Image (cartoon, helix red, strand yellow):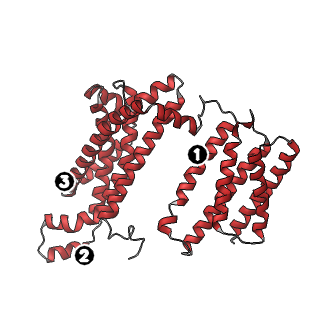
């Protein structure tokens, strides 16, 4: 057992033992919390005798379930409850640490069990969020619990679907395609002109630094209140990252490689298609991934400055004024999932297209 694993096991045991004593002194501790603290106290045995990694995982899961079951017991949870939460967090960290070590030592499959680690991390954040907001009676107007956000999300599916269609399927995708496509084409043109390369790229850096809140009202006045003005904001935000990255990628091929193409009597088009664009592919996909998040942010912010009565940005701005914070968080959750899926799809396409690149092959030459 590594030093970190020893420290985590000792922390879980010590915190659980103190919490168990406090719970017994209180005399009215819920049975699930008592069981959690007792199981944590027994992890002192873990320092002496090794047990299975899955035993740590079982203790982690049972502890989390017990804490959630004990949440409604008090108006304000006592100290031993929070000590049980700290012990559960230590169990989760210990399990993830042991699982990572097992994957490194090839004791378990990294392709299968490697997905468990980010899953546990995400669930742990939601679990702590849920326990802290409900256990400390945080007002919903400040921060609703994930369970409240989920309930509101289920109740507001038609509204969320309409907002998603207006913002993502119309403004984001249209602006993303036009901005990235235009940036790519202009980069090909700029690459052939040293004058444009020296004159346009500094302007690109300048425009990229412009704030969205300064561009959005102007686009609304130019293109109206519907999704076209939001798509125009997305075009302005995605054009120059694609332009700058593509121009940089086209310069990645070495002079030796370009001389070899000239030796084979290859023209500009053949050199571009068979050498320079493949070499620039990692840079192009890097711009596509960056723009996938910029496009969604730009469209949502642009909707704050004028839109029909539908859209993610419109819903967030109006529901904040009504103090419907759970619906605001539901919109944020939909936007986060949509942006993550969008980014993931582009990353998968990148792996399929640039399978030859060392970054995709794990750094092997």
Badges 1 and 3: C-beta atoms under 8 Å apart?
no
Res 214 visible:
no
Q: Is the residue under label 1 in contact with that under label 2 (CB below 8 Å)?
A: no
**Label 1 neighbour load within 10 Å: few <14, some 14-19, many 20+:** some
Q: Residue at x 69, y 48 (%)?
A: 66
User: Where does the C terminus fall, quadrant-wise?
Assistant: bottom left
Q: Is label 1 in a helix, a strand or a loop?
A: helix
Q: Which residue is mark 3?
A: 189
Indicate which disc residue 187 carries.
none
Q: Quadrant of residue 2?
A: bottom right
Q: In screen coordinates, is 321 left or right of 339? A: right
How far across and down, in percent of the image, does residue 201 sit?
Answer: 29, 50
Query: How many numbered marks have been drawn onto this rendered protein structure?
Result: 3
- x then y, percent, for residue 40: 75, 57
Task: Determine whether, in the image, residue 243 is placed left or right of residue 335.
Answer: left
> Which residue is pictured at 19% across the width and 76% down the height?
260
SS label for mark 3:
helix
Q: Is residue 234 above or below residue 347?
A: above
Question: Which image quarter holds the N terminus?
Answer: bottom right
Looking at the picture, tell me which residue is in the foreground, 233 or 153: 153
Q: Earlier in the sequence, mark 1 or mark 3?
A: 1
Considering every residue shown, the one lying at the far front of the view is: 31
**187 displayed left or right of 9:** left
Q: Which mark is residue 126?
A: 1
């Amino acid at each position: 057992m590594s030093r970190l694993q020893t420290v985590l096991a000792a922390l879980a045991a010590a915190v659980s033992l103190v919490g168990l004593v406090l719970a017994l002194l209180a005399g009215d501790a819920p049975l699930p919390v008592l069981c959690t603290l007792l199981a944590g106290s027994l992890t002192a045995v873990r320092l002496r005798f090794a047990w299975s990694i899955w035993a740590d995982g079982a203790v982690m899961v049972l502890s989390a379930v017990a804490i959630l079951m004990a949440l409604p017991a008090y108006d304000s949870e006592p100290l031993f409850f929070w000590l049980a939460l700290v012990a559960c967090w230590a169990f989760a960290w210990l399990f993830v640490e042991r699982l990572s070590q097992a994957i490194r030592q090839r004791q378990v499959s990294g392709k299968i069990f490697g997905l468990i680690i980010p899953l546990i991390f995400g669930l742990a954040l939601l679990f702590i969020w849920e326990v802290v907001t409900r256990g400390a009676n945080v007002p919903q107007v400040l921060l609703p619990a994930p369970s409240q956000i989920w309930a509101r999300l289920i109740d507001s599916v038609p509204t969320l679907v309409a907002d998603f269609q207006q913002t993502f399927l119309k403004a984001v995708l249209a602006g993303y395609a036009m901005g990235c496509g235009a940036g790519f084409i202009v980069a090909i043109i700029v690459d052939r002109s040293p004058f444009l390369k020296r004159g346009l790229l500094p302007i690109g850096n300048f425009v990229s630094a412009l704030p969205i809140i300064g561009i959005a009202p102007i686009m609304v006045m130019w293109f109206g209140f519907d999704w076209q003005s939001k798509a125009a904001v997305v075009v302005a935000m995605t054009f120059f990252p694609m332009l700058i990255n593509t121009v940089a990628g086209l310069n990645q091929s070495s002079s030796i490689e370009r001389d070899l193409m000239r030796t084979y009597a290859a023209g500009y088009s053949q050199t571009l298609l068979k050498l320079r664009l493949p070499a620039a592919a990692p840079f192009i996909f890097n711009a596509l991934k960056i723009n996938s998040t910029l496009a969604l942010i730009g469209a949502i912010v642009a909707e704050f400055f004028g839109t029909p009565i539908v859209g993610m940005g419109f819903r967030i701005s109006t529901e904040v004024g009504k103090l419907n914070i759970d619906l605001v968080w539901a919109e944020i959750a939909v936007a986060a999932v949509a942006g993550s899926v969008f980014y993931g799809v582009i990353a998968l396409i990148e792996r399929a297209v640039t399978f030859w690149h060392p970054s995709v092959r794990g750094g092997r030459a």
